Image (cartoon, rainbow, N blue to C red):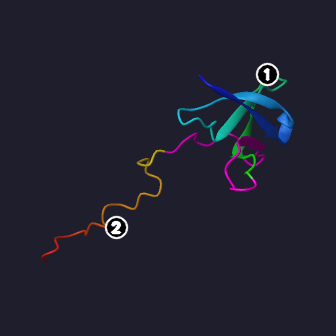
Amino acid sequence: MKSDDTPFEGGPLDGRVLPVLLGITGHPPKTYRVPVPAPDGGPPTVLVYRRVQAATSRRLGLHRGWKYVFDPEDDGSGPRFALPWGGRGHKGRDAGGATPGGNADE
């Protein structure tokens, strides 16, 4: 697997550069979750970092790498990914769309 040295901003990892595994497309994951164990043995706290563009080139405005920014609002308890057919926002069969609900000859 290929990895890339990625800088982190904010939170406890501020200023660190860590190797992050790249996906099939050559990009690091959109979110980076860091579990921090509780000192009293309770459930771990999850720190969430979001991927953003590190910089753009001056002349052409091309993408110049990634960095992770700390997201204090996210507690890491939400879903990691959403499937397009997962049912959230499903309107039902006759709620509109490209196909008419009944027979077109009626």
The amino acid marked with disc number 1 is Gly
| Eye-nearest disc, 1 or 2 | 2
> Magenta region: which residues?
58-82
Q: Nearer the viewer, residue 5 or 99?
A: 5
Mark 1: secondary structure = loop
Give the quarter of the image for residue 60.
Answer: bottom right
Residue 4 visible in rendering: yes
> Circle 2 sits in a helix, a strand or a loop, which is it?
loop
Tell which circle, 1 or 2, labels the residue nearer the N-terminal end: 1
Is residue 37 toward the left or the right of residue 60 in the image? right
**Depth check, front residue: 57 or 6:** 57
Q: Main secondary structure of the magenta part?
A: loop
Disc 2 marks a residue whose amino acid type is Gly
Residue 47 lies in the magenta-colored region: no
Residue 77 showing in the rendered view: no
Q: Kindly identify the residue that appears in the image at 80 percent across and 31 percent down.
A: 17
Q: Quadrant of the N terminus?
A: top right
Asked if 17 appears above or below 85 in the picture, the reply is above
Task: Compute the Cα span from label 1 to label 2.
Answer: 52 Å
The residue that label 2 is drawn on is 97
- The residue under the point 31% across, 61% down is 93
Residue 104 position within the rendered picture, expressed as x and y whole percent measured from the top left: 17, 74
Numbered circles on residues, count: 2
Residue at numbered disc 1: 41
